[in-house]
Amino acid sequence: MSEKTILRALKGERLPVPPVWMMRQAGRYLPEYRTTRAQAGDFLSLCYNPDLAAEVTLQPIRRYGFDAAILFADILLLPQALGLDLWFVTGEGPRLSTVTTAAQVAALKPAAAIHDTLSPIYETVRILARELPRETTLIGFAGAPWTVATYMVAGRGTPDQAPAHAFMAQDRAAFTALIDLIAQGTIDYLSAQIEAGAEVVKLFDSWAGSLKGRDFDDFALEPTRRIIAALKSRHPGIPVIAFPREAGSRYAGFAHATGADCVALDNSVSADWAAAEVQKDGCVQGNLNPRLLVSGGDELVAETRRIVQAFSQGPHIFNLGHGITPEADPDNVSRMLEAIRG
Ligand code: 1CP
């Protein structure tokens, strides 16, 4: 049994100890990340520097021995590759030039043009495929079309995604054309990551929770289904993790409807509910509250064990319900791992 643990879980195998990695495992809570980031200059320079991006991807693997490494990049590189300006304001977050009309959607670059901008990312993947320990799985990723569109329309992160909802209400056809372009770009981007050596890909739909009813079907479920179908036809057997964050009751049936091999759960759903309603369709990933890596203590250990126990009857990859925060204590990550691995 030499196959990597994450790949076994993704095929539906129940393992005695769940494999584990963390969203945002390369990040500001680690002093070695802050050092490399300072060396790169700014965040985007780090993303586009294959040697340094590979270095920060490897740092949490060296420190903790996670079962998977996730490529260091960002979901907003694709909009940049489609022609938008992108910059990061220190202490605030990303900013982009915006797309709010049918004419602006039509003026974006075609999906086929993205590789001009994104080729350094594929080089990062090639370096990682060479350098990672043989037991560590390499995960590539992209944003799901709805989440990427929310940033393209608003030009920044928004608490309620109101600008994207307004564009959708005003011109559903033009908004659909934007989603279709992002979906095509995502297929090409993830295919290139797979060709460079990514063994699993993950789609981050961080704002899926603000879509309801038919909008959830049209803009979260359907684009995800289409991307997964295209990837599996180009790369048979490639496992896909979908993360429709805060989908609530819509997590049930999501894997079945989209073809995802694994559904990643945020920490707003109970592990017991998800074990019954989501894990019955296959592997689940999640879902420790990242706040516990700041506060630590007995509650961290108890909650980690409770999640492992709740999902112990089926395939499970241990992870957080959202990304680890800069305030997290690196020693609490070790405590979490001890509680999982014993
Ligand atoms: O160094 C820094 O200060 C930058 C912080 C940072 C990091 C470490 C950003 C800015 N992006 C990243 C890396 C990143 N982003 C990864 C790398 C791999 C890893 O997990 O270690 C991944 C997978 C992402 C994905 C991402 N970027 C998402 C989806 C997941 C999520 O967190 O919901 C989103 C929404 C983004 C956009 C983004 N990039 C960065 C920030 C601060 C944000 C959120 C902006 C906002 O909504 O206001």
Image (cartoon, rainbow, N blue to C red):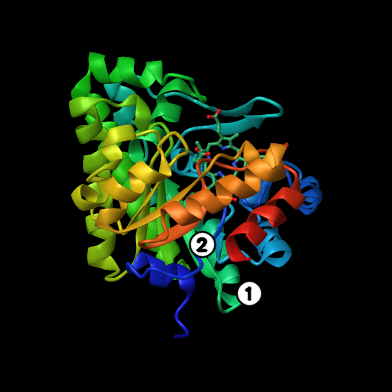
Secondary element at image label 2: helix
Establish if 263 lies above or below 132: above
Confirm or reject: label 1 Cβ below 8 Å from ligand 1. Answer: no
Is residue 31 positioned above or below 57 on the image?
above
**Quarter for ligand 1?**
top right
**Mark sitting earlier along the chain (1/2):** 2
Side (left or right) of 4 relative to 133 = left
Residue at point 76% right, 44% down?
Answer: 41
Residue 258 relative to residue 70: left or right: left
Task: Answer left or right for 282 relative to 51.
Answer: left
Q: CA distance from mark 1 to mark 2?
A: 14 Å
Residue 131's mark?
Answer: 1
For the N terminus, the quadrant is bottom left
Residue 330: percent from the left, percent from the top? 75, 50
| Residue type indicated by callout 2 | Tyr
- Circle 2 sits on which residue? 122
Q: Which one is in front, 195 or 162?
A: 162
Question: Residue 204 appears in which quarter of the rendering?
Answer: top left
Q: Look at 43% across and 36% down and name the residue there.
A: 206
